[in-house]
């Protein structure tokens, strides 16, 4: 049985995707890799971890050969705000890395998961119930790399029969690893600050509506689309998926149901606000529901309850050490 390679495995998604994959497929069959040399999570320390720079094709070829890789979850990338601060590096990592992954997949017959984003849409995209097939003219370098990445996945699927699968993920909320330089980071940060300090200063305006998803649903979606029957997949670029469409004010109100004294104020960052304003308010994910049975489990209320419980447990454990 071949193994699974995860690039960018020490980030917000990889820190939870790797343990989830290991729980399903076995510790030794999931190879976590990242640009960072020292594994920071306990999960990475217990099972195979390798340093891998996805912009170096030779390193990918060596890893795929050494570990007999059959599937690659390609997570390594710069997120929207980090990419806007370093557009040239973002192109190199996001596009160069994906190209190298697709080439190695072509050579060795690997399946590839590519995480696209709501950032693949732009101001001329319909903002509400954004369709699966629609205008994609993003105004950020992050979005440019996500649209080009989606098209490259389509091309490798049709031209070289590489088994590519992808999702247009919304902002992800989680508590294991901090988000890494995105526009939707405020959502996860708000929960952490609510538990630690009882207050949060948000960098987006109170009414900024964006799609969000709790990490357990995102992990399920990634594994489910990779395991789906290939004959049922109409899209090889990326499927729209969402779980909720919410504003900072609405998340704050949900937190207040559990922490009544929670205070939120706003200090708007014009760069991240402009990015958020260019993205959809809500996605139509019916193609994912029809083709491979996508159905999220967490709405805002369920996510808020679980996030706060988990964060309070972690804080109590840290204080008792
Ligand atoms: P993250 O920033 O938390 O983690 C990315 C990881 O990639 C980091 O650990 C970093 O060290 C690593 N990395 C950077 N350059 C690399 C290189 N050259 N080679 C190997 N590793 C490198 O990001 P994340 O939130 O885990 O996101 C993973 C993927 O999912 C990205 O493609 C992102 O665009 C996409 N995505 C994330 C979200 C979200 O809300 N987290 C939403 C939509 C899409
Ligand atoms: C970001 O804000 O950059 C990411 C994303 C939605 O792609 N969280």
Image (cartoon, rainbow, N blue to C red):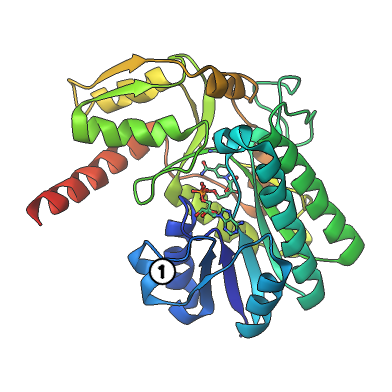
Q: Is mark 1 within 8 Å of ligand 1?
A: no
Decide if residue 32 is on the left or right side of residue 120. left
Q: Is residue 72 above or below residue 145?
A: below
- Which quadrant of the figure shows ligand 2? top right
Q: Tag 1: Cα neighbours inside 10 Å, few (<14), some, or many (≥20)?
A: many
Total marks placed: 1
Decide if residue 236 is on the left or right side of residue 213. right
Q: Quadrant of residue 97?
A: bottom right
Q: Quadrant of residue 161?
A: bottom right
Decide if residue 251 is on the left or right side of residue 76. left
Q: Is residue 104 above or below residue 77?
A: below
Element under disc 1: helix
| Image spot of residue 8 (x, y percent) | 55, 58
The residue sitting at the left extreme is 320
| Image spot of residue 249 (x, y percent) | 38, 18
Q: Is residue 144 above or below residue 274?
A: below
| Image spot of residue 266 (x, y percent) | 38, 15
Residue displayed at 48% across by 19% down? 269
Residue displayed at 35% across by 51% down? 176
Q: Which residue is mark 1?
A: 44
Q: Is residue 19 above or below residue 214?
A: below
Decide if residue 231 is on the left or right side of residue 286. right
Q: Quadrant of the C terminus?
A: bottom left
Q: Between residues 147 and 35, which one lies in front from this camera angle?
A: 35
Q: Quadrant of the N terminus?
A: bottom right
The residue sitting at the right extreme is 159
Q: Between residues 73 and 59, which one lies in front from this camera angle?
A: 59
């Amino acid at each position: 049985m071949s193994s699974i390679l995860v690039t960018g495995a020490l980030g917000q998604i990889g820190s939870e995707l790797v343990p989830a994959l290991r729980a399903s497929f076995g510790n030794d069959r999931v190879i976590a890799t990242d640009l960072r040399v020292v594994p920071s999570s306990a999960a990475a320390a217990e099972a195979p971890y390798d340093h891998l720079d996805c912009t170096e094709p030779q390193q990918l070829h060596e890893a795929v050969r050494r570990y007999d890789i059959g599937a690659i979850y390609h997570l390594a990338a710069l997120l929207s705000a980090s990419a806007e601060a370093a557009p040239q590096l973002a192109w190199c990592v996001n596009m160069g890395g994906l190209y190298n992954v697709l080439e190695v997949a072509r050579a060795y017959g690997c399946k590839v998961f590519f995480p696209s984003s709501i950032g693949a849409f732009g101001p001329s995209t319909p903002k509400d119930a954004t369709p699966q097939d629609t205008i994609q003219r993003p105004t950020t370098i992050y979005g440019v790399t996500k649209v080009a990445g989606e098209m490259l996945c389509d091309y490798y699927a049709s031209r070289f029969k590489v088994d590519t699968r992808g999702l247009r993920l919304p902002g992800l909320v989680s508590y294991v690893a901090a988000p890494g330089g995105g526009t939707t980071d405020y959502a996860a940060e708000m929960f952490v600050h609510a538990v630690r300090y009882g207050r949060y200063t948000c960098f987006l305006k109170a009414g900024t509506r964006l799609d969000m998803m709790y990490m357990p649903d995102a992990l399920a979606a990634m594994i489910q689309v990779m395991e789906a029957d290939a004959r049922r997949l109409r899209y090889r670029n990326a499927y729209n998926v969402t779980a909720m469409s919410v504003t900072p004010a609405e998340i704050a109100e949900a937190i207040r149901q559990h922490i009544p004294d929670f205070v939120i104020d706003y200090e708007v960052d014009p760069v991240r606000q402009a990015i958020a304003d260019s993205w959809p308010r809500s996605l139509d994910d019916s193609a994912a529901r029809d083709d491979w049975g996508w159905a999220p489990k967490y709405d805002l209320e369920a996510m808020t309850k679980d996030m706060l419980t988990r964060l309070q447990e972690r804080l109590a454990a840290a204080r008792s050490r």
